[in-house]
Image (tube, rainbow, N blue to C red):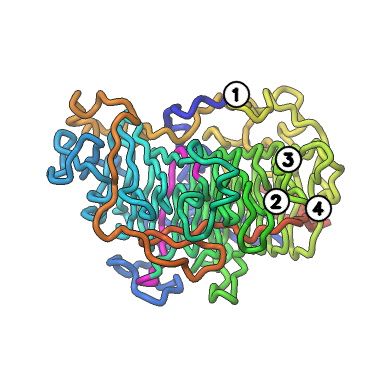
Amino acid sequence: MLAGLGAKVTGAAVAAGVAALVVTGIVMIPSGADYSVSARSTAAQASPSALTSPAPRPSAPVETRAPAPSPAAASVRTSRPAKAPVPTYFVSAKGNDSNPGTSAGAPFRTLQKAADLAGPGDVVAVMNGTYTEPRKGSNVLTVTRSGRPGAPITFMAYPGQRPVLHPRTAWNGISVYGASHIVIENLEVEGNNAALSLADAERSSSRTDPTYNTNCIAVEKNRESGAFPHHVDIIGNLVHDCAGGGISAIEADDIDIVGNHVHSNSWFTVFGSSGISVLTPRGGDGSRTYGIRITGNRVHDNETKVKWEGCRCYSDGNGIIVDTTKGDPARGRPAYDGRVLVANKVSYDNGGSGIHAYRSQHVDIVHNTAYLNGRSPRITSPYANIFAHDSTDVRLLDNIAYGRPGQATNSTSGNVDVTYDYNVYFGGKAPETKGPHDLVADPRFAAPGTGPDADFRLTKGSPAIGSGTPFPAVSTDFTGAPRKGGAPERGAYSFGAAEETVAGSGGASAAAQENPDTAAGSGAETGTDAAGTDTAGTGAAGTDAASGPSGDAGSGPSAQGGGEPLAETGGSDPVLPLSIAAGVLVVGAGLFVLARRRRS
C-alpha cells in the first residue's frame, strides 16, 4: 500500500522496475521480425557525436559505445559508477555559501553554489531544509556542468535526511539545462499548488508568468549553447504539486526515469503537460537499443485544469506520455533513432491517459497497471488507460487497464505495426480491439482505489497470474522482485509481491547507506532540524530567467533553461490500433534469449 509522502526510499523501491545486470549477450524480443534490443553499456556510453547538436557538448570527451548487454539490463541506470557515491559537497539550509562546503560541518547554503563548482564524479549531498528560488523566474537548481562516463555529477539527499526543493514562482524546481552524465536521486520537489487556486489560474495564468507554470524537474536543450542533454538519471524522487509538469525531458537521449513517485502536477499550467513526459528526443543508437527507460514509477492525480494555450482546449494531464518521437520537422526536430521502454509503472486517477504513445515510433509499453485514468471532466473525448495513437512500431504487452464506467477501454487508429496483446481489460466500454491473448476480466486487485492506501497487487484467482508473455527487457516487477521466466504475471506486480515502499522522500539511497563514509560528519549541528524548517534561497549569479518566451510552441520562458513543459500535443481523440503479436516461444540458456512473435 501507499505510504505517506514522507516514506523513505529503500533499495527495493529504487530498484523497482529495474532489471538485474546479470545477463550478457544478445536478447531477442517480440517483433514482426526478430531483432535484438540492447541497453547502454556500463563500460562505455553513447557517443555524443550520435546526438544531433548545433554546438559542442559541455566539456565531455568523445566516447564510443561498446557492445551493450542484453535488454534484461535495459532499464538499469548506468550513469552512476558501481561504487557507492561519497559526498564531495554538502548543502544545508543552515549553511553559508562562504563555507568550504566540503564537509557536513561547514556546508554551503544554496544548491546553486554547489552546482556551479561540481565536476565529474562529484556528489552533492543535500541536507535537511526547504530550498527555494532566489527570485521570481529563476530555478531552485540549474545544472549546466556535465559529468563524464563513469563519473556523473550526482545530486542526492544526505543519508537519512529529507530535504525539500520548493519552487514557488520558479520556472523549475530542477533544470538540467544541456548538461550530461547527471544523477538526481532521492530528493523531494514540492511545488506551490497549495497556495494557488483554479479561479486565479484561469484568470491570471499566462505563458510568460512562471507562477502557474512551474515544472518540478525539467531536462532540456541549452538554448544558448545548443547542447542536448544525455545520460541523465532521475531516480527515487518524490515529485509533486507543481503547477506545470512533473518530470519532463525535451530533446534529450539516454534518460532513465526510475522509481519516482509523481503526483498532483499540471493543474494550473497553460501548457499541455503531464506527470512524466518525453518530447522529441534526440539522437539514439537504432531502434534495437533502449535510449530512454521509464520504469518502476508510481504516477497519479496529474491533470490539466486550465486550457492549453496552443489550442485553447483541454489536453493531456497524463500519467506518462511518449510524445512525437517520430520527430517534428516544423520545429527542426528529427525523428528519434532509439527505442523507448515504459515498464512496471502504476498509474491511476490521472486526468488524461495512464500511459500513451503519441505520434511516436519504437516504443515498448510493457507490464504496467493503469486504473481509472481519464478522470478529467474537461476533456471531451476522455483518454483510454493505455494506448498508442498515430504511431509506428509500438508494442503494448502484459498490461492491466481498468477503465472508468462508460469510458473507452481502448480504440483503433491509423497506427502502423503496433502490437497489442496479452493485456487484461476491465471496466469501461467493451474494448474496440482485442489481441488474441487479451482478456476482459476483473484483475482482482488487493485494494484498488484512488487514495493513499490503494493496493494494486494481485490476489488469488486473478486472470493476470501466470498468463503473460515473457519480455526479457523486464525481468523484475514494480517492487524489484524477479518475474517468472515462462509465464509471468500481467501488470506491474508479480503475484505474491511484497508491499512496496513509496519512492521519493529524499531518504538515503541504498548505495549511500552501504557506504560508511557518507555518514561522516552527520552530527547534531546538521542532522537535527526537521525537513522544511529552514529555508534557503538557492539561486546564484547567472540563474536569472531569460527574457521572453522560448521559440518552442507550447513552452514558457526559462531560467537559463528548463521552462518548457512537455507533452503538449497529446490531442483529445486518442485511439488504439489493431496489430497483433502472438507469443514468445523459446527461452535460451546462457547468453541469449530468443522470442518469436506470430501475427494473427
180 in relation to 294, above or below: below
Give the residue displayed 33% in from the left and 55% down from the top. 143
Give the residue displayed 40% in from the left and 69% down from the top. 223
Percent from the top left, x then y, of residue 491?
A: 67, 38
For residue 326: magenta?
no
For residue 237: magenta?
yes
Quarter-of-image position of residue 481: top right
Who comes first in sequence, dot 3 or dot 1?
Answer: 3
Who comes first in sequence, dot 2 or dot 4?
Answer: 2
Label 2 or label 3, whichever lies nearer to me, is 3
Q: Are marks 3 and 1 in contact (CB under 8 Å)?
A: no
| Residue position for label 2 | 396
Q: Camera-side residue: 527 or 546?
A: 546
Left or right: residue 237 versus residue 81 is right
Percent from the top left, x then y, of residue 331?
A: 55, 74
264 in relation to 561, above or below: above
Residue 550 numbered tag: none
Percent from the top left, x then y, of residue 214?
A: 47, 50
| Residue position for label 1 | 453
